[in-house]
Image (cartoon, rainbow, N blue to C red):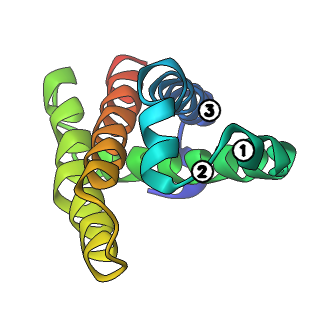
């Protein structure tokens, strides 16, 4: 399946949904814990280039959503639950082990790993749900 055959509306909606999950997860739910685990302060966050950070993060979300769409189209016979499970397996089988390996070698805390790993599972579940339903 070529890139032109993908549903770009679905890809964008799924990317936005993943982005919203990140805003909620790293905002009111885990924001303070994540900053503490990263050793960041509110001032550090304010001093970052938010346009660059959020802009690049959204572009990366679109890329992830497009790749998820491509993978899900390879499993065309799956029902909605199966499509969500594929997204979950991508997160649990590829993303979480990859960041876990990075965190082990960079000696990041278990708390930071759990915060970030849970986010990526939720991110892919949200995107997978959009891709399954649209």
Image position of 88 (left or right of 124): left
Number of on-image labels:
3
Residue 40, numbered label: 2
User: Residue 92: x percent and y percent?
Assistant: 18, 51
User: Which quarter of the figure is the C terminus placed in?
Assistant: top left
Sequence-first tag of 1 and 3:
3
12 in relation to 120, above or below: above
Q: Disc 2, disc 1: CB below 8 Å? A: yes
Q: Secondary structure at mark 1?
A: helix
The answer to which of 1 and 43 lies nearer the viewer is 43
Query: CA–CA distance between discs 3 and 2?
Result: 31 Å
Q: Secondary structure at mark 3?
A: helix
Sequence-first tag of 3 and 2:
3
Name the image quarter holding residue 45: top right
- Binning the other alpha carbons within 10 Å of mark 2 as few (below 14), some (14 to 19) or many (20 upward) gives few
- Binning the other alpha carbons within 10 Å of mark 3 as few (below 14), some (14 to 19) or many (20 upward) gives many
Query: CA–CA distance between discs 1 and 3?
Result: 27 Å
Sequence-first tag of 2 and 1:
2
Residue beneath label 3, please? 12
Residue 45, numbered label: 1
66 in relation to 32, above or below: below
Q: Residue at x 54, y 46 (%)?
A: 5
Name the image quarter holding residue 126: top left
Image position of 77 (left or right of 115): left
Q: Residue at x 47, y 26 (%)?
A: 21
User: Residue 71: x percent and y percent?
Assistant: 33, 53
The answer to which of 113 and 1 lies nearer the viewer is 113
10 in relation to 96, above or below: above
Q: Residue at x 55, y 25 (%)?
A: 27
């Amino acid at each position: 399946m070529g890139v032109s055959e993908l549903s770009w509306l679905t890809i964008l909606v799924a990317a936005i949904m993943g982005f919203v999950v990140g805003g909620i997860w790293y905002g009111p739910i885990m924001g303070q814990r994540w900053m503490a685990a990263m050793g960041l302060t509110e001032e550090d966050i304010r001093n970052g280039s938010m346009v660059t950070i959020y802009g690049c993060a959204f572009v990366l979300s679109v890329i992830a959503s497009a790749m998820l769409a491509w993978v899900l189209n390879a499993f065309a016979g799956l029902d909605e639950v199966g499509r969500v499970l594929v997204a979950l397996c991508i997160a649990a089988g590829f993303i979480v082990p990859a960041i876990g390996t990075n965190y082990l070698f960079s000696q990041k805390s278990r708390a930071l790993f759990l915060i970030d790993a849970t986010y990526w599972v939720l991110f892919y579940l949200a995107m997978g749900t959009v891709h399954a339903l649209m």
